Amino acid sequence: MSAKSFTPGQVFSTVVVEDLKRTQLVQYAGASGDFNPMHTDEVYAIQVGGFPSLFAHGMLTMAMTGTLTTDTLGVANLTRFGGRFTAQVWPGDTLTATLTVLSVTPGDHGDAVEVEVHTVNQDGVEVFVGTAAAHLA
Amino acid sequence: MIGRFPIEAGQVLAFARAIGDRDPQYARVADPGAGDLADVVPPPTYVQASAHFDPEYPLRPKPGTPWFGSGSGPGEAGTETLRMLHAEQHFEYHRPLRVGDVLTAEGHQGDTWERTGRRGGKLTFTELITVYHDAAGDPVVTARAVVAVTEKAPDAKTTAEAE
């Protein structure tokens, strides 16, 4: 992979999902193996869970945030990716992920890049916040 | 404990599609001219799909076992699921995971701590650490989940409270 160079303070941002559909939650359930009815079964989520509707797997929100992270840094370069789920994501939500370069540390075998990532919904409410690190040879 | 978690191209493609990952390496999986796919690196949260290979995984319907979701009725609370919240998730990559890897996974419990939520309920946080090893026995990914269990079933506001 060719060396990309980053500068602290650089910001990358993208809409990772627009008008989230229930079908995508079912798609994610099938792909990940997490069939929790809270995320796949509207009847259950409302009548048993007491929620206004089903809601997204936190791990789908993290994974969608991850697409900005890997598009920016390269999936094979990642050394760390993690964060906290700070609000639920509902069908109809539009999520925007933002990545901010925190630091770039040159080394003998390339740069170590640390970034912050956070994702907000259409009302500006943060749903995921975390950090990632990559080694760019 | 997961005895065999093969990193399969088709499952990686399905996962990439489900999360809206447009990295062109995943479209190669369905391309007849793509050749060897062993350089395909799955998305960074892909080890979550190891649930498919966990014989005991509770959030998958199993033949002959009652499922707690809706059918003729609305389903039942039954399990702890309603009181559990995924609060945090962290991955450490010891090397890039690749299609063709065959992993094993072993989990253990890390720290546990308690906190009072903003509205007075008790929240118990537990760290669950899973280390994925390759066929040579070398670690590939270490996953650390923080799960919060509430005293009673959460409502729409509790996730933010667990923050």
Image: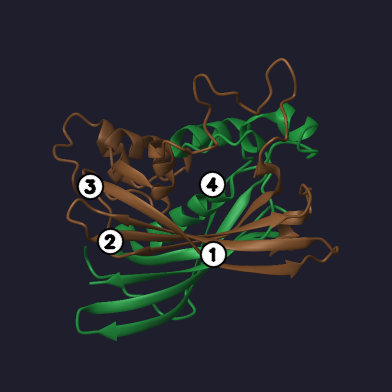
Residue of label 3: B101
Q: Residue at x 45, y 81 (%)?
A: A8
The lab-note entry on whether marks 3 and 1 share a chain reads: no
Badge 1, how many Cα within 10 Å: few under 14, some, many 20+?
many
Residue for point 24% across, 70% down: A3
Task: Nearest to the eye among marks 3 and 2: give it.
Answer: 2
Chain on which label 4 sits: A
Residue located beneath label 4 in the image: A60
The amino acid sitting under disc 1 is Gly
For the residue marked with disc 3, what is the amino acid?
Asp
How far apart, in angstroms, are the residues tagged by discs 3 and 2? 12 Å
Q: Nearer the viewer, residue A77 or B144?
A: B144
Write down the chain letter for disc 3: B
Q: Secondary structure at mark 4?
A: helix
Same chain under badges 1 and 4? The reply is yes
How many other residues sit within 10 Å of disc 4, few (<14), some (14-19) or many (≥20)?
Answer: many
Which of the numbered marks, if any, corresponds to residue B42?
none
The green-coloured chain is labelled: A
